[in-house]
Image (tube, rainbow, N blue to C red):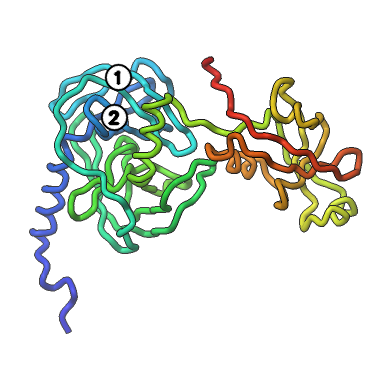
Amino acid sequence: MSSPLSDLSLDAISNRAADLLDRVAPRLVAIHGARRSSSTGIIWRPGLVVTAEETLEVDEDIVVTRPDGSRAPATLVGRDPSTDIALLRTEEQPIADLPFRETSGLRVGHLVLAAGRQSEGLSAALGIVALAGGPWRSLRGGHIDRRLHLDLRLDARSEGGAALDVSGDIIGMTVLGPRGRVLVIPSETIGRVAQQLLDHGRIARGYLGLGLQPVSIDQTVADAAGLTEPRGLIVISVDSSGPGQRAGIKQGDVLIRWNADPLYSVRRVYALLGPESVGQSVVLGVLRSGKQISLTVEIAERPNPQE
């Protein structure tokens, strides 16, 4: 019995991958900043470059190596750690007509080419979609439109580069996730976040004005509160002008519920304080001196530390 791939020429596959890399090359730049090595960026629009936020250690002294090999300064328009997207502005140059394609058609097993640019030239890695899920929240609370993992090895200098489908369209940006896993920030997420960064310079996030830390709760108290685990979040600080203070939350209170859901980790609170949370009201279940009370907090927008 013949293999399903028996009619495919390795030369044809090889040449196709090289052609795809040549096609995206005019949209890739190398980014140099205060770090040991470079990273990659994708020209999103003329004069605007998207890259992986985590690769930018500082906001200043950024230089890009353009597709023609020349160098130009770049300034930071804005950055969103929750989705790992940063937007840079640099000198405008004509760009290739290469679309960002939505990822709805991607399935596990589809081939993907990861393309980057380093000081020495282009870089590439070929792999498959190892996982293709639905929307998810990053560890920093960012809304990512699809969970996409790639089975390939990504050079750190190619982080922030383009993930291409077999048509050569850009389906997203490659980043390094936990334990070296290669993730794709989908094109849908890039378009939404980059536009907000261009319009406002940042992504609004919710703010309670509370410093929180995990704490164990007496089992009897936890049972009385209907908690399956004897844990909560103790308030270690309160912003004197923040939403928590206005709602009556005090240092030493223990938060145990967010509306009807139990609260066990600070990470969970951070995930709940996404852009859509600003202006919403939440009922916090609180333990104070062993007694349960409920306090309603109106979530504010996190202050900009630069203001």
Q: Position of residue 73 (x, y in %)?
A: 27, 17
Q: Residue at x 80, y 45 (%)?
A: 216
Q: Secondary structure at mark 2?
A: strand
Where residue 249 sits, quadrant-wise, is top right
Q: CA–CA distance between discs 1 and 2?
A: 9 Å
**Along the polypeptide, which appears first: circle 1 or circle 2?**
2
Q: Position of residue 199 (x, y in %)?
A: 39, 26
Where residue 98 sits, quadrant-wise, is top left
Q: What's the residue type where badge 2 is placed?
A: Val
Q: Nearer the viewer, residue 104 or 168?
A: 104
How many numbered marks are there?
A: 2
Mark 2, residue position: 49
Q: Residue at x 15, y 80 (%)?
A: 2
| Dot label at residue 206 | none
Q: Position of residue 279 (x, y in %)?
A: 61, 34
Mark 1 and 2 residues: CB-CB less than 8 Å, in contact? yes
Q: Nearer the viewer, residue 155 or 203?
A: 203
Q: Residue at x 68, y 44 (%)?
A: 265
Would you place residue 50 above or below residue 127 in this image? above
Would you place residue 23 above or below residue 235 in this image? below
- Image quadrant occupied by the N terminus: bottom left
How many other residues sit within 10 Å of disc 2, few (<14), some (14-19) or many (≥20)?
many
Q: Nearer the viewer, residue 256 or 300?
A: 300
Mark 1, residue position: 74
